[in-house]
């Protein structure tokens, strides 16, 4: 977390009190969304990797996602000198698009400047993959976002969680709380995901992909 704070050291919370509501609305450049399920019972599960990453970014920037709007919890921040909104949809994972479509519409942010952070079964645990557009690979949260926005052309930060053992149903694997040992193993990849978000906003997706898509 200390490394994250250094990375975000030149970021600061958006001072919305110094702007009118319309000015603040017009200024937002990025929406950074983590996918997950609301509720304490889901807080430490693999399927909430997106929520966990957003929490890391928020903590590194000294903000809390305590404003509820558009069916989500939000916080406004400045990332790499650009005004952004962090959001954790509260619609449950498979309906995440309902929250994000309303949020992007209100702030007039194009889909190309939406970053969605989510878990990915088809990526080995400990790995990270970034991409823009493409299929949803069976991820229903990503599918919801693409369907409601009418385009798949948003940026994804995909956190590898790997496939469960053959005798472990996928749903149980996704929604079962991680053990302490599993959380310790999982944590570095969440930090890398937060770093990747910062890199995308600061220097573009291509550079971020070059830095993070090969990392283990």
Image: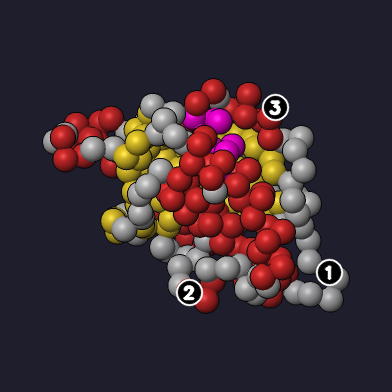
Mark toward the viewer: 1 or 2: 2
Give whichever of discs 2 and 3 has the lower sequence position: 2
Name the quadrant containing residue 83.
Answer: top left
User: What's the residue at 61%, 68% (across, down)?
Assistant: 45
Give whichever of discs 1 and 2 has the lower sequence position: 2
Q: Answer whether labels 2 and 3 touch (C-beta < 8 Å).
A: no
Describe the element under mark 1 as helix, strand or loop.
loop
**Image height of 124 relative to 176, above or below:** above
Principal secondary structure, stretch drawn in magenta: helix
**Image height of 38 relative to 198, above or below:** below
The image shows residue 3 at horizontal and vertical percentages of 56, 41
Say left or right for 28 vs 216. left
Name the quadrant containing residue 24.
Answer: top left
Describe the element under mark 3 as helix, strand or loop.
helix
Q: Which residue is mark 3?
A: 210
Q: How far is disc 2 from disc 3 in space, using C-alphas?
A: 36 Å
**Image height of 23 relative to 50, above or below:** above
Mark toward the viewer: 3 or 1: 3
Q: Which residue is mark 1?
A: 165
The image shows residue 63 at horizontal and vertical percentages of 35, 49
Q: Is residue 181 visible?
A: yes
Q: Which residues are magenta?
A: 194-201
Q: Which residue is mark 2?
A: 40
User: What's the residue at 45%, 68% (across, down)?
Assistant: 38
Name the outermost residue toward the front. 2
Q: Residues within 10 Å of mark 1 (few under 14, many from 20)?
A: few
Q: Residues within 10 Å of mark 3 (few under 14, many from 20)?
A: few
Say left or right for 43 vs 108. right
- Residue 144's disc is none
Q: Nearer the viewer, residue 151 or 208?
A: 208
């Amino acid at each position: 977390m200390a490394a994250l704070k250094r990375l975000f050291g030149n970021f600061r919370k958006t001072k919305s009190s110094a702007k009118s509501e319309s000015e603040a609305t017009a200024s937002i450049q990025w929406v950074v969304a983590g996918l997950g399920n609301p509720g304490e019972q889901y807080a430490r599960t693999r399927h909430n990797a997106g929520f966990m990453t957003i929490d890391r970014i928020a903590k590194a920037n000294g903000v809390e996602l305590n404003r509820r709007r558009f069916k989500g919890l939000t916080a406004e921040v400045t990332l790499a000198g650009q005004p952004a909104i962090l959001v954790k949809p509260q619609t449950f994972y498979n309906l995440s698009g309902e929250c994000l479509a309303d949020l992007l519409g209100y702030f007039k942010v194009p889909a190309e400047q939406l970053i969605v952070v989510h878990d990915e079964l088809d990526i080995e645990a400990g790995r990270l993959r970034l991409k823009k557009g493409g299929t949803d690979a069976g991820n229903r949260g990503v599918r919801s976002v693409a369907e409601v926005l009418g385009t798949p052309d948003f940026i994804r930060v995909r956190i590898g969680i790997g496939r469960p053992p053959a005798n472990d149903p996928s749903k149980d694997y996704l929604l079962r709380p991680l053990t302490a040992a599993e959380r310790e193993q999982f944590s570095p990849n969440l930090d890398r995901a937060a770093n990747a978000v910062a890199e995308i906003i600061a220097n573009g997706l291509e550079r971020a992909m070059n830095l993070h898509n090969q990392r283990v």
